[in-house]
Image (cartoon, helix red, strand yellow):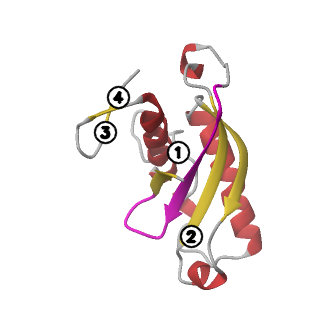
Amino acid sequence: MTGIDRHSGAHIDNYTSALQAVEVAFSTAIGERVMRRHFGAGLVELLGRAVTPRLFAAWKILMVIGIDLWEPRFRVRGVYVSASPDALRLGSASVSVEVDWRPRAHLGDFTVEGVRSFSIAFGGPRVQVSVA
């Protein structure tokens, strides 16, 4: 299966399409989409708050739930913070996510074809998901 990159219009492979779906879910505020008000991960609503251990724990939970709800091709194994305390204080964070890759899960076949990792960067103009 291939998809279309939302920024360039180029064809992308199945894995890149799944990464793009995670990026869209994480950068969409709940209630933002008119015909799908329940879509989103709830992360955008937490931006701008003081970073505390409790808030960061909530972010990690919302990331896992967002992927579980909106991207069936991934099953999360772990979420790991890879930012220094100074970067966090400045509102910039990078998180690594380890997932089971199930390329046909959206079709009902939940066979795991490997473990993959990708990183999510917060703090720029948008949420950025990239292969780790």
Whether residues under marks 2 and 1 lie with C-beta atoms below 8 angstroms apart, the answer is: no
Q: Quadrant of residue 2?
A: top left
**Mark 2 and mark 1: span between their CA atoms?**
19 Å
Q: Residues within 10 Å of mark 1 (few under 14, many from 20)?
A: many
Which amino acid does the dot numbered 4 rest on?
Gly
Whether residues under marks 4 and 3 lie with C-beta atoms below 8 angstroms apart, the answer is: yes
Decide which of tag 3 and tag 1 comes sooner along the chain: 3
| Residue 43 in the image, given as x and y percentages of width and height | 57, 57
Residue at 48 percent across and 41 percent down: it is 19
Decide which of tag 2 and tag 1 comes sooner along the chain: 1
| Residue 33 in the image, given as x and y percentages of width and height | 41, 42
Q: Is residue 70 left or right of residue 79?
A: left
Residue where numbered disc 2 is placed: 93
Which amino acid does the dot numbered 1 rest on?
Gly
Which amino acid does the dot numbered 2 rest on?
Ala
Residue where numbered disc 4 is placed: 3
Decide which of tag 1 and tag 4 comes sooner along the chain: 4
Whether residues under marks 3 and 1 lie with C-beta atoms below 8 angstroms apart, the answer is: no
| Secondary structure of residue under mark 2 | strand
Decide which of tag 2 and tag 4 comes sooner along the chain: 4
Q: Residues within 10 Å of mark 3 (few under 14, many from 20)?
A: some
Decide which of tag 3 and tag 2 comes sooner along the chain: 3
39 vs 37, nearest the viewer: 39
Residue 96's disc is: none
Residue where numbered disc 3 is placed: 5
Q: Vertical placement of 58 versus 101: above or below?
A: below
**Mark 3 and mark 1: span between their CA atoms?**
19 Å
